[in-house]
Amino acid sequence: MEAGIVGLPNVGKSTLFNALTCSKAAQSENYPFCTIEPNEGIVAVPDERLERITKYIVPKKIIPTSLKLVDIAGIVKGASEGEGLGNKFLSHIRQVDAIVQVVRCFDDPDVIHVSGQVDPVTDIEIIETELMLADIQTLENAFSKAERTARSGDKEAKLRMSVIEKCNAHLAQDLPLRTLTLTEPELASISSFGLMTAKPILYVANVSETDLEGKDPLVAKVREHVANSGAEVVCVCAKLESELAELDEPDRSEMLAELGLDEPALNQIARGTYRTLGLESYFTAGEKEVRAWPIPAGATAPQAAGVIHSDFERGFIRAEVYTLEDLETYKSEKDIRQAGKLRVEGKSYVMKDGDICHFLFNV
């Protein structure tokens, strides 16, 4: 699963990406951030539950989950028609699973806004419009192909035509496809199209160093604009975060304390992106390692086991499950078992966020 960071020029997108993927605080065995290519990076997802588990189960390693971020080429008005790096921009967005849009919510005469004035809602609308126009073009091309195939009586092609018409009607109302409810078969029929407005989105309000809590009217406009979309808004000062990312742990902690912050805002972005991707975590815990594993919300126990290794899912027998609260109450796995709190779950069990598990399998 990966997310693409998008934004207009001069909104702080690349500054934020570089801070996320180059943080000195994360460059350790336990928190592996790294840059894969100039525009791609792996970012750990901080989770305080890992530290709580290790108070009772002391491992050699602590391994958080991670996600892949892509710094996508900046967009300009007309990208859907090939303006600027439009085609490259759009092709990269089609490949990611979620969008992280950075919007500028600060004034700075030294950093010229591409539109001449700072208006984050207009920024959001420009990108949304370009993505809608590109989706309409994709759907129109796909409809012609589906129509030809449907003449032979192909049921899948007929369904695809119906879904395309439904999507086009929704887009015609200036509504992104992520707000359109489709059935599983309908979603499957258009899954190969890479429709961009169907992807979940997280908005990052890039604020000034004097507005770390996001109280500026510009941020309020963003929150109001996306209030009914179900999307999350995270506030961050990219300039400040880039400075924090360069510091070693003692200096970073000192600077955070001076600012009255518990953690870098980058952590909030990582967790927000994780939620936007529809992911949850379960844990495995032992002397070798305490590790968080990513699963889609609603995953079954065999599917969760398959994240570790495909053999675990194929040969799944059962899962032994307990909660962090159980561990904090009984202090050890042995005592959890003796208290009868260790649950045995089968193939139909739907995982809960934060479950601590052992999987039994036979291949």
Image (tube, rainbow, N blue to C red):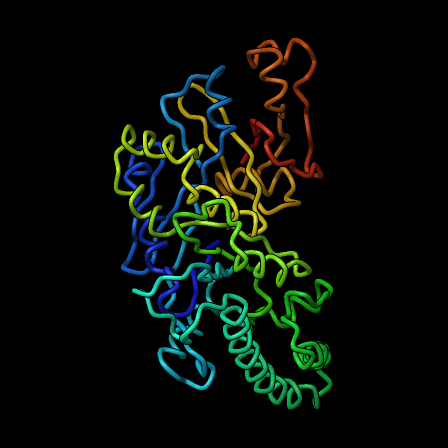
Q: Is residue 267 left or right of residue 196?
A: left
Residue 8, position as x, y percentages in the image: 41, 69
- Displayed quadrant of residue 128: bottom right
Pinpoint residue 207: horizontal percent, then vertical percent: 44, 53
What percent of the width, then of the height, locates residue 169?
71, 80
- Between 53 and 215, the one lying in front of the other is 215
Would residue 310 be found to the left or right of residue 301 on screen? left
Residue 57 position (above or below residue 222) = above
- Of residues 150 and 177, the one nearer the viewer is 177
Residue drawn at (43%, 55%), measured in percent from left and top?
206
Can residue 111 be seen by looking at this rendering? yes
Where 136 falls versus 326 (above or below)? below
Q: Is the residue 178 above or below the residue 132 in the image?
A: above
Image point 69% across, 86% down: which residue? 150
Q: Where residue 289 sits: x, y (%)?
A: 41, 25
Residue 157, visible in the rendered structure = no
